[in-house]
């Protein structure tokens, strides 16, 4: 198959912190093209590569679909460089790239298109900050900083209409939700809380049908180091609410979640176990899947995204090689290897959906790479 024409990008970057980020041309390839692109499985139909230089050794990446295309932000997990962001067009071409020097945290919870603004969650070992970001990424204003809070993954969930939206956070034995406006401002007066039996250690959320879906992990005081995870709806109307739901596993860490078809009001939760297995459980769709499903016997950093027909799960295997699995609505699993695709750490890759397009996006030593999944 022929290679798509190279898109010339005349963006020049100055020095950022103590290093320089260099951007070459965006390379767009069909998955079958013969070039220096590492091989991809049959599940990948298109590959876009944005060469970058001067990237940190390990990064935390957040990406979301926007009305204009995609917005991606990353931070240095060692805290040595400020955040950096790029905007991609709907065809995944580079539209803008710039440093975000006000954001110096080493972790990201997520970024979303709230309407008027983008909102971003970043964190450190002691605090979580919500940022109101202009749509061109040129400005980032701190909206709220919460001390000793657990930073959720996907902390700004909504419903299929994208309105209203809540901000979800946790501290101690309390899970909280509050409305967040399309201007990125959190309505603290609307905050509702749900108590948990143990200290909340992780939270992940996703848009649902007419409410949101979340999963949270909490430490079990009865067993040293043990952690269980629970699924819950997050009510949006007429007021926020966190009713709770089923316990999914008593051996659960590093949770992520994605919602299934609106008509089924279903969700999937993926996690790792204490002995480093990757597992998943599908809840809803006409019943409760009572057993976790093994995705991998050894792995880390799972991510998950529904594409409109099936779920996709990405993770690092026991040798830190990127892997991808499909998980259909009948819990059938198909695994795909991605040899040669090397993310800059366990948080340097994400799954993202925009309309009918779902992608596996990673920051690697070569730059930003967007693998479009076949639908």
Image: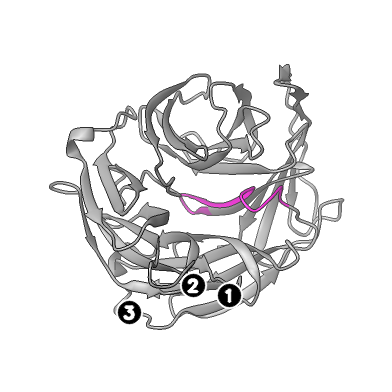
Name the residue rendered at 79%, 42% in the picture: 366
In this view, which residue lies farthest toward the top?
14
Name the residue rendered at 34%, 61% in the picture: 198
Question: Which quarter of the picture shows residue 55?
Answer: top right
Residue 50 vertical position relative to residue 95 in the rendered view, above or below: below
Q: Which residue is mark 1?
A: 295
Say which element carries label 2.
strand
Q: Which residue is mark 3?
A: 288
Q: Label 2 to label 1, Cα distance in Å?
A: 7 Å
Q: Is 346 inside the magenta-drawn segment?
A: yes
Count neighbours of disc 3 (C-alpha within 10 A) and say few if under 14, some if 14 to 19, many if 20 or more. Answer: few
Is there CB contact under 8 Å for labels 2 and 1?
Answer: yes
Report the span colored magenta. Answer: 343-357
Residue 99 at x, y = what percent? 62, 23
Question: Which quarter of the picture shows residue 339?
Answer: bottom right
Q: Which residue is mark 2?
A: 280
Q: Is 236 inside the magenta-drawn segment?
A: no
Residue 127 at x, y = what percent? 45, 36
**Mark count:** 3
Residue 307 in sight here: no
């Amino acid at each position: 198959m022929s290679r798509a024409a190279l898109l010339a990008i005349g963006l020049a970057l100055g020095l950022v912190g103590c290093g320089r980020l260099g951007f070459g041309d965006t390379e767009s390839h069909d998955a079958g093209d013969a070039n220096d692109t590492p091989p991809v499985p049959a599940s990948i139909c298109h590959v876009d590569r944005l060469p970058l230089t001067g990237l940190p050794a390990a990064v935390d990446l957040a990406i979301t679909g926007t009305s204009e295309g995609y917005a991606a932000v990353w931070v240095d997990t060692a805290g040595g460089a400020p955040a950096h962001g790029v905007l991609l067009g709907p065809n995944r071409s580079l539209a803008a790239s710039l440093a975000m020097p006000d954001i110096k945290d080493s972790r990201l919870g997520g970024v979303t298109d709230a309407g008027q603004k983008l909102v971003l969650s970043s964190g450190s070992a002691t605090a979580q900050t919500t940022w109101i970001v202009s749509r061109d990424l040129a400005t980032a204003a701190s909206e709220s900083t919460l001390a000793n809070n657990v930073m959720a993954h996907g902390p700004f969930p909504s419903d299929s209409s994208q309105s209203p939206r809540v901000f979800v956070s946790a501290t101690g034995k309390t899970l909280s939700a509050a409305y967040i406006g399309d201007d990125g401002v959190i309505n603290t007066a609307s905050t509702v809380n749900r108590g948990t039996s143990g200290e909340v250690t992780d939270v992940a959320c996703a848009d649902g049908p007419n409410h949101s879906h979340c999963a949270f992990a909490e430490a079990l005081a009865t067993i040293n180091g043990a952690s269980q995870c629970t699924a819950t709806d997050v009510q949006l109307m007429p007021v926020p609410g966190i009713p709770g739901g089923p316990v999914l596993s008593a051996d659960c860490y590093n949770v992520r979640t994605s919602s299934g078809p609106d008509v089924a009001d279903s969700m999937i939760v993926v996690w790792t176990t204490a002995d480093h297995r990757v597992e998943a459980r599908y809840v809803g769709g006409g019943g409760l899947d009572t057993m976790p499903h093994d995705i991998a016997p050894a792995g880390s950093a799972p991510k998950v995204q529904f594409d409109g027909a099936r779920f996709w799960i990405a993770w690092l295997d026991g040798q830190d090689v990127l892997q991808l699995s499909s998980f259909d609505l009948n819990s059938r699993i198909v695994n795909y290897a991605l040899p040669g695709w090397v993310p800059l750490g366990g948080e340097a890759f994400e799954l993202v959906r925009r309309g009918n397009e779902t992608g596996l996006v990673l920051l690697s030593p070569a730059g930003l790479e967007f693998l479009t999944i076949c639908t």
